[in-house]
Image (cartoon, helix red, strand yellow):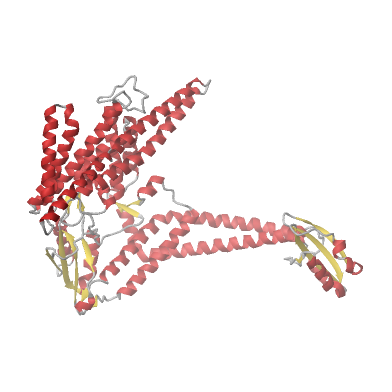
């Protein structure tokens, strides 16, 4: 439950061991490799027996092939993923032996899958193109199906030209007799019909007048139409093309069926994509090594608790390589990794969303855990909501295998569900007030006469306690770093002042003596702050002036405490909405026949809606209170994330247990 201790690590070995060391690092996932400044060291990158850049390009080509294969599969048989799986992080679960089988076949299997996918894709595209061509020809021929002869038959007539015209219906309609008025003695025409877009006609004109006919028709908005398959009668060509379409559609169905069956190789494609990606990553990492003619050197960072297993792996696989470590120098930017186990692990998600604390500072995760747990339950405030949230989270954890942030969030929702159950029992929230007649709250009823005041007072009390707790953490941090006076001056006096003001305002309810004690505490704290908060100023006037001005910061602390009223606002709103849903549902009980059905529908869907919006609000506002009001008192964020070189799988999640 702390920030992991980091060591600077250097690995030296013969170049022949470089590939093995890179593979060990990737499998162990323990070392963050840092690139050297080559200009200062005056040496070249590692030169393997196979050139590094060509190795990168080699694996990149296979990655692109597998991406093409997977895109082809998605086009013909999309892999179904639940909404939550897509949101949290989806991976294809595969046994270790099955994964190993695909990797062993490696490049040969990848080439075979790629070739099969390309052949199917090409064949399907070809058939689709022919289908589109035939359909287009049928569309062009349809208006001329009653022509009765092949269009090419007119070409044998020496003195007459057959002109086929079409005109869009949107153009102004002009009778053909008017259009061809000037050439009517040398032309004959016939309307051939129309479709949704155009009207069509055939004009027979003397060859000497065909140019004049074409110009007259063009002026009226007609365009010459080119007919396909001119050697056949249009109706016969249409019949033949329909038969061809039927055959092509049958051929397409067979190809699509083969493509769908090909999608059964998706596990292999997933495995090979991840395998080649990791191999490429090895080459990219090796390109950052330093090398002489026979040896290589790399530097990086390693967590101290992972050093021993890593050294053991290197000794077993590359015994000639040496692993050396040292403590970080003061001017080095040391990466940060958090170690939180057990009940604190899911709450690490709250910290990581904010960022990472600096190396050497405090990990706030175990400190915020209890507060976030309480606040989430307070905002939700309904025991049945808590049961639903807990069961849903547990189900998704079982159904969807996740890692990292996905696992943290699901476990966090489980913890939030438990907190909601507890607070719901304390306040009597069971689907709003649905069961209030039979089940009474163990603590207080927010809807009772004094319930809202108790609720608001509880929210302020939690705020005051967490703000003071945060200041106490900062004081402890100053003490452990040898800054005793800062702990007294910057935190101690403020705590005395704030406690004094609190007793002065509310102590009268406990007795007059508490108010008097509060007054003297407030005065003592204020005097201490005036005398110490300007201690860094160069002269006495500025010291006292800065000390007096610092008292204005009490408004910031009060504002922080008031901000916790959001716990009351969200929790109370959740209860009220639940009660309104119950009221609306009960109104429907009087509807004949279907009254009870409508009651259940409104009750279930209404409370599910209330649950969903409150889960979002509870998470956001509980986290916000940590980020703004709590972390601001002690946390020092801005750390650099520790990113070790490791196996990264985009698609597969190798299940070791499944293989046993």
Closest to the observer: 170 or 88?
170
**Residue 157 appears in the figure:** no
In the rendered view, does 69 fall on the left or right side of 175? left
627 to 29, vertically: above or below: above
Picture residue at 21% right of the left edge, 67% below the top: 21
Identify which residue, 114 or 177, lies in the foreground: 177
41 vs 208, left or right, is left
Q: Is residue 325 left or right of residue 233?
A: left
Give the residue at x 23% y 44%: 555
- Report which quarter residue 418 is drawn in: top left
The answer to whether residue 28 is above or below residue 380 is: below
- Residue 312 percent coordinates (x, y): 14, 60
Q: Position of residue 483 (x, y in %)?
A: 9, 53
Whether residue 545 appears in this view of the structure is yes
Measuring from the top left, give residue 294's x and y in whole percent: 19, 78
Which image quadrant is residue 278 in? bottom left
Percent x, y of residue 542: 14, 55
């Amino acid at each position: 439950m702390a920030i992991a201790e980091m060591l600077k690590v250097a690995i030296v070995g013969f170049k022949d061991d470089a590939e093995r060391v890179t593979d060990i690092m990737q499998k162990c996932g323990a070392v963050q490799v840092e690139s050297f400044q080559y200009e200062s060291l005056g040496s070249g990158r590692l030169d393997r027996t196979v050139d590094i850049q060509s190795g990168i390009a080699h694996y990149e080509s296979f990655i692109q092939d597998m991406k093409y294969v997977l895109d082809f599969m998605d086009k013909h048989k999309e892999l179904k993923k639940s909404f939550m799986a897509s949101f949290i992080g989806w991976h294809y679960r595969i046994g270790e032996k099955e994964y190993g089988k695909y990797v062993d076949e490696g490049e040969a299997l990848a080439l075979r899958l790629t070739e099969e996918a390309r052949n199917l894709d090409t064949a399907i595209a070809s058939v689709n193109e022919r289908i589109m061509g035939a359909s287009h020809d049928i569309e062009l021929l349809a208006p001329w199906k009653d022509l009765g002869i092949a269009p090419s038959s007119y070409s044998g007539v020496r003195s007459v030209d057959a002109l086929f015209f079409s005109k869009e219906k949107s153009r102004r309609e002009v009778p053909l007799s008017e259009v061809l008025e000037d050439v009517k003695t040398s032309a004959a025409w016939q309307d051939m019909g129309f479709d949704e877009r155009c009207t069509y006609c055939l004009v027979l004109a003397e060859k000497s007048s065909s140019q004049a006919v074409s110009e007259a028709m063009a002026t009226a908005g007609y365009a010459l139409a080119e007919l396909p398959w001119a050697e056949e009668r249009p109706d016969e060509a249409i019949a033949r093309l329909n038969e061809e379409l039927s055959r092509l559609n049958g051929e397409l169905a067979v190809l699509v069926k083969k493509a769908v069956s090909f999608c059964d190789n998706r596990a292999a494609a997933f495995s090979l994509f991840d395998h080649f990606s990791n191999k490429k990553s090895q080459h990219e990492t090796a390109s950052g090594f330093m090398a002489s003619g026979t040896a290589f050197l790399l530097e990086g960072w390693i967590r101290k608790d992972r050093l021993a297993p890593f050294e053991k792996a290197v000794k077993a696989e590359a015994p000639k390589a040496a692993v050396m470590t040292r403590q970080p120098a003061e001017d080095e930017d040391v990466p940060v990794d958090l170690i939180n186990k057990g009940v604190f692990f899911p709450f690490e998600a709250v910290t990581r969303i904010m960022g990472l604390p600096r190396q050497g500072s405090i990990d706030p995760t175990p400190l915020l855990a209890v507060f976030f747990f309480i606040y989430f339950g307070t905002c939700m405030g309904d025991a049945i909501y808590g049961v639903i949230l807990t069961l849903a989270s547990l189900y998704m954890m079982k159904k969807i295998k996740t890692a990292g942030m996905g696992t943290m969030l699901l476990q966090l929702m489980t913890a939030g569900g438990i907190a909601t159950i507890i607070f719901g029992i304390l306040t009597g929230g069971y689907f709003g007030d649905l069961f209030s007649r039979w089940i009474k709250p163990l603590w207080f009823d927010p809807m009772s006469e004094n319930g809202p005041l108790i609720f608001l007072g509880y929210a302020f009390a939690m705020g005051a306690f967490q703000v003071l707790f945060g200041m106490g953490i900062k004081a402890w941090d100053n003490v452990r770093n040898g800054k005793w006076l800062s702990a007294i001056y910057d935190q101690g006096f403020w705590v005395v002042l704030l406690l004094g003001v609190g007793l002065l305002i509310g102590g009268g309810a406990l007795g007059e003596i508490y108010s008097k004690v509060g007054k003297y505490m407030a005065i003592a704290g204020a005097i201490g702050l005036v005398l110490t908060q300007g201690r860094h100023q160069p002269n006495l006037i500025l010291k006292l002036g800065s000390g007096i001005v610092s008292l204005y910061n009490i408004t910031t602390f009060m504002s922080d405490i008031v901000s916790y009223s959001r716990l009351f606002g969200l929790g109370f709103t959740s209860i009220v909405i639940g009660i309104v849903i119950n009221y609306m549902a009960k109104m429907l009980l009087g509807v004949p026949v279907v009254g009870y059905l409508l009651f259940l529908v409104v009750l279930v869907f209404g409370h599910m809606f209330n649950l969903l919006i409150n889960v979002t609000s509870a998470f956001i506002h509980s986290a916000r209170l940590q980020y703004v009001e709590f972390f601001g008192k002690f946390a020092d964020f801005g750390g650099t994330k520790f990113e070790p070189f490791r196996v990264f799988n985009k698609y597969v999640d190798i299940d070791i247990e499944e293989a046993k």
